[in-house]
Image: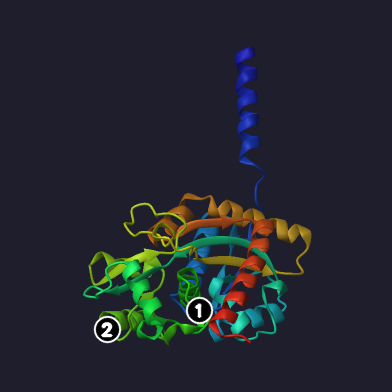
Amino acid sequence: MKKSMTIVAAAALAFASAGPAVAEIKRLEITAPAAAGGGYDQNARIMQQVLQKEGLASGIQVVNQPGAGGTIGLANYVNNKKRTPTLLMGGLALVGAIITNKSTVSFEDTYPLARLSADYQPIVVAADSPYKTVEDLIAKFKADPGSISWGGSGPGSTDHMLYGLLAKAAGVEPSKINYVVLTSGGEMLSGVMGGHVTVGTGGYSELSAQINAGKVRALAISSPERLPGIDIPTFKEKGYDVNLVNWRAVFAPKDLKAEEKQELEQAIDKMVKSEDWKAAVKQRGWSDAYMPPAEFAAFVKQEHVRAEGLFKELGLLK
């Protein structure tokens, strides 16, 4: 009798620990405010696959709306009131675009649902560059700022932010950065390898193949500590207080009912804990950066303030 009761109790405990079942969200639409293939699009399509496989959502459609650094997609998302459940991908790059493009809408017009993934950024030079270490590069930069050209995507991008933070940490006015706008990661790599720009950057996941092949040399990376299996020193390790993560996240409509928010929160929480999600993040060389709604909402505000202050120092804002 006691053995039977023990089995029943164990079963009840197992059921309780599994948590309540999550209702399937039907006809979910995910907006990626960028062209196909980029970080927002990849995150959206992984979500599509995992949410469907886990039975958390069905009939999921990913819609790409590129333009103006993501602010066109953001504006359409905020202003188009749809009856069906909708989500929006976003991240640090969109924070920058909102500020530099003076967007009439911002993440304040959404419900920050969760931070999902992160990509840390190394700075790279050509394999035959005279700058063997970040100390070599900074010494030249401090002596003659204009002699170092820094390649990256549009003004106010995560690339530009990283260079601005490094300049500040090195004691050089960020406005003295000789910033060269390049239209794509491929153009940036060609520029570095061809000697057209001194320094380039991008997500480690984008640059790892060229770094490992010895086509470019990574001098330092923007992570707070060394990444497992990656032999690149951090800026902090080299004495420069630089910490920047190109995070990507998911947002929901601001005016959702409490039960609708709860459904989405539970679905995302289950998704990021699934083995398929973890495997997909690892495969792309990203870091797991999950942050639930309350914590994430505060983080977004902090990132906006930090970016705005940095843009003033870079001369992008008056």
State the residue at coordinates (62%, 80%). 98
Q: Residues within 10 Å of mark 1 (few under 14, many from 20)?
A: some
Q: Which mark is residue 173?
A: 1
| Image disc number at residue 6 | none
Q: Residue at x 34, y 70 (%)?
A: 207
Q: Quadrant of the C terminus?
A: bottom right
In this view, the mark in front (2 or 1): 1
Report whether 310 appears left or right of 170. right
Q: Tell me which corner region of the image, top left, top right, bottom left or bottom right, holds residue 291.
A: bottom right
Q: Which mark is residue 195?
A: 2
Residue 148 in view: yes
Image location of residue 23, percent across then percent down: 66, 54
- Decide if residue 3 is on the left or right side of residue 218: right
- 44, 284: nearer the viewer: 284
Left/right of residue 31 with respect to residue 189 in the rendered view = right
Q: Quadrant of residue 99?
A: bottom right
> Looking at numbered disc 1 in the image, what kind of residue is underneath it?
Glu
Q: Is residue 73 visible?
A: no
Taking 54 as reference, is 203 above or below it?
Answer: below
Q: Residue at x 71, y 72 (%)?
A: 108
Local secondary structure at mark 1:
loop
Q: Secondary structure at mark 2?
A: loop
Task: Please state, as top left, top right, bottom left or bottom right, where the N terminus lies in the image.
Answer: top right
Residue occupying image coordinates x 42% and y 60%: 239
Q: Nearest the camera: 12 or 135? A: 135
How far from the left and from the top, in percent, is residue 141?
Answer: 38, 77
